[in-house]
Every structure is written in structure tokens, then in C-alpha cells.
Amino acid sequence: MSLRPCALAIGIALSATSMAPALAWAQNVATGDAEAAFLAENDEAMTTMMTGMEVKPSGDIDRDFVAMMVPHHQGAIDMAQAELRYGRNETLRRIAQEIIVEQQQEIAAMRLALGQPLPPGVPAPDQLQPER
């Protein structure tokens, strides 16, 4: 065996091993970008939720309760949507989907209990199809 093929094989092996850190770095950057986006979305959801829950008392406990709970539930929806965008665990993604549906149903039920209109595109709880 001549030295050329052996040197070529060593060169290829060295190139492959020297590329491994670069590939790992690229994966970390992509993962880091997704995590940064996920964390930013969750931070925004939490900030919006906390601001929305700052309700000036109206003298009507039921209205105040709904006024605080709607942004609380919407925060859970927003966080679950971020999980669906960035999460990879199928069990957690399924739970996030369930959170979205359940929280939307509860928002609708609370608004209806007070005689408030539903936002466009939100079915009343009795119009939702049962899960099969």
C-alpha cells in the first residue's frame, strides 16, 4: 500500500473529526435559537397575562373574577402555543393542545355566564364537539 491512499484516508478522517465540533456548534445554535424564541414568547405571554390580571375592582365580584381569569387562561393558551411551535415531546405537545381547547372553553363559559359576547370564531361550550 502506498502512502498516498493512507494519507488520503487519514486526511478524510481528520476532516470528519474536525467537522464534528462545527456540526455540534451549528446544532446548538439552532437549538439555542429555538429556545431563545420559546423563552421570549413565554416571557411575553407571562407579561401580558400579569398586566391583564391587574383589574380595578368594579364592585361586582363575578365580573372581577372573569376579568382576571380570562387573561390568566389566555396566558396558558399562549404558552401552550409556544410549546406546540418549539416543543418536541409528543406527550407534552398533546397536553398543550388539550390546554388550548380547555382554556378556550372555560373563557367562553365564563363570558356566557356573565352574559358577555363571545369573541368572533369562538364556539359556545355547548357547540363544541366532544372529544372521541
Image: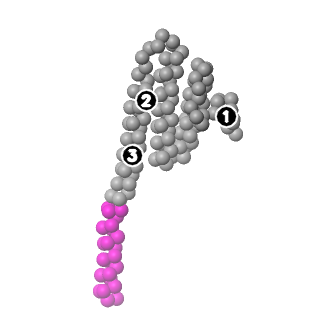
Badge 1 element: loop
Disc 3 crowd rating (10 Å Cα; few below 14, some 14-19, many 20+) is: some
Q: Say which residue appears at 37% left-offset and 50% top-offset.
A: 33
Camera-side mark, 1 or 3? 1
Residue found at x 30% / y 77%: 11
Q: Quadrant of the C terminus?
A: top right
Range shown magenta = 1-23
Measuring 58% from the left and 34% from the top, which residue is drawn there?
120
Does label 2 or label 1 sit earlier along the sequence? 2
Q: Quadrant of residue 9?
A: bottom left
Residue identified by numbered label 3: 37
Q: Amino acid at mark 1?
A: Leu
Gap between marks 2 and 1, in whole Å?
Answer: 25 Å
Mark 2 or 3, closer to the camera: 2
Left or right of 124 on screen, residue 88: left
Indicate which disc, 2 or 3, sits on the residue closer to the N terminus: 3
Residue ranking furthest to the top: 59
18 sits to left or right of 59: left
**Residue, disc 2:** 49
Can residue 53 be seen here? Answer: yes
- What amino acid is labelled 2 in the image? Met
Q: Is residue 123 above or below residue 90?
A: above
Q: Which residue is mark 1?
A: 128
SS under mark 3: helix
